[in-house]
Image: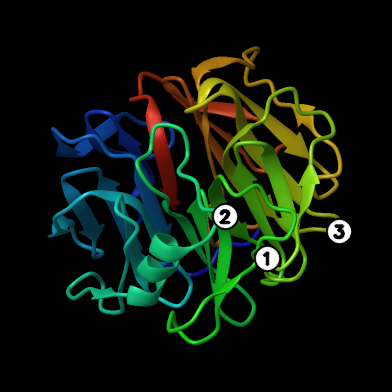
Amino acid sequence: MVIMRRRYDPLGIVIAHDDGLAQVIPGGKSETVVSGERFTSVSYYDGLAIAAAPEKGVWVHNMKNWQQVWEGNARTVAAIGTGDLFIATADGKLLKSADRGVEWEELESAAALIKHGQRMVPMAGESRPFVTGVVQSDQGIVISVGGGGCWYTRDKGNTWLKHSDGLDAKTHGIWAHPEKKERLFATADSGVFRSEDEGYSWLQSQGGLDRAWGGSMAVLSGAPDTLVVSMARHAPGVDGAVFRSANGGATWTRVSLEGEDEWDRVPCVERPWDWEDVVFISAGTRLFASHDKGRNWIGLSDGLPVANAIAASL
């Protein structure tokens, strides 16, 4: 297990839920930090957190407090290793900030590829495709599009190449390997996928999974890699369970959390960006942690809001 020196006070686990945004230090009670809005996406990297409430806007924590920095219908947010923040909107736009959310630049080429992209079909319940994830890859940025697969840019979003061979177009999210940035993972309507070439080609991973709708994922490096993923039987995230793979996604086994392995809503999985072996799961009203790549789990907190998404700042 490796932890890097902190330059900021940790937030704990940030929970995006139906009634607001909460923070909880593992083992303690949750604290409401933004109330009255339904938050569905949250992301954290190296002292910078960002969260989205659809139809209301985006909030950023700038090492001091949470502040609303943008108004509109945000669906996905991301903080990545370049220090940039991203907002994906319901109408297919992608915005970027390089100054901690003070100013936002629209990547017009991303909106154009979604608007004019061939064979893009919105996911169930959506009016149009939109960006569902943003990651830093080996030599550029890769985005996942719900209804349009994955796309890659090496020139900061001026031009995009489709990187979706073998990938379900209805992609829910994308994750980069913490060390080998050319290795990517994605979840979609039809399960879990893996790429070894920055998303150019993908292989589906199904062995041991008893449901297909992919949720969130933690990627823990090793030889081979360990993966922890949440899955559901029905869209959007109904009848959830958690699975672990100790061989990079070749096969999967069900995770039991103190005797429970089924939840009404799909659990949320998160690996802190600067820890090698630690994984958190928010399942129902409880928070669980593993310090050995998901082999063993301990319950940390109960009575929490049911999460739509979580991020970890420790």
Amino acid found under the numbered disc labelled 3: Ala
Tell me the kind of residue under disc 1. Answer: Gly
Colouring style: rainbow
Q: Where is residue 299 drawn, in percent x and y? A: 54, 25
- For mark 1, does the 10 Å Cα neighbourhood hold few (<14), some (14 to 19), or many (20 or more) residues? many
Establish if 84 lies above or below 55. below
Q: Nearer the viewer, residue 250 or 201?
A: 201
Mark 3 or 1, which is nearer the eye?
1
**Marks 3/1: CA distance?**
21 Å
Residue 221: x and y in percent read 73, 59
> Do residues under tags 2 and 1 come within 8 Å of each other at their CB atoms?
yes
Tell me the CA gap for discs 2 and 3: 21 Å
Front position in the image: 297 or 233: 233
263 left or right of 284?
right
Question: Is residue 292 visible in the rendered structure shown here?
Answer: no
Residue at 56% across, 79% down: 140
Q: Is residue 90 above or below residue 264?
A: below
* Residue name at image x 62 percent, y 13 percent: 260
Vertical comparison of 46 with 105: above or below:
above
Mark linked to residue 199: 1
Crowd rating for badge 3 (residues with CA inside 10 Å; few <14, some 14–19, many 20+): few
| Residue 150 percent location from the top left of the image | 58, 61
Quarter-of-image position of residue 37: top left
Q: Which residue is mark 2?
A: 174
First reached walking from the N terminus: tag 2 or tag 1: 2
Classify mark 2: helix, strand or loop.
Answer: strand
Kind of residue at disc 2: Ile
- 2 vs 3, front mark: 2
Q: Which mark is residue 223?
A: 3
Looking at the rendered structure, the number of numbered marks drawn on it comes to: 3
In primary-sequence order, the first of circles 3 and 1 is: 1
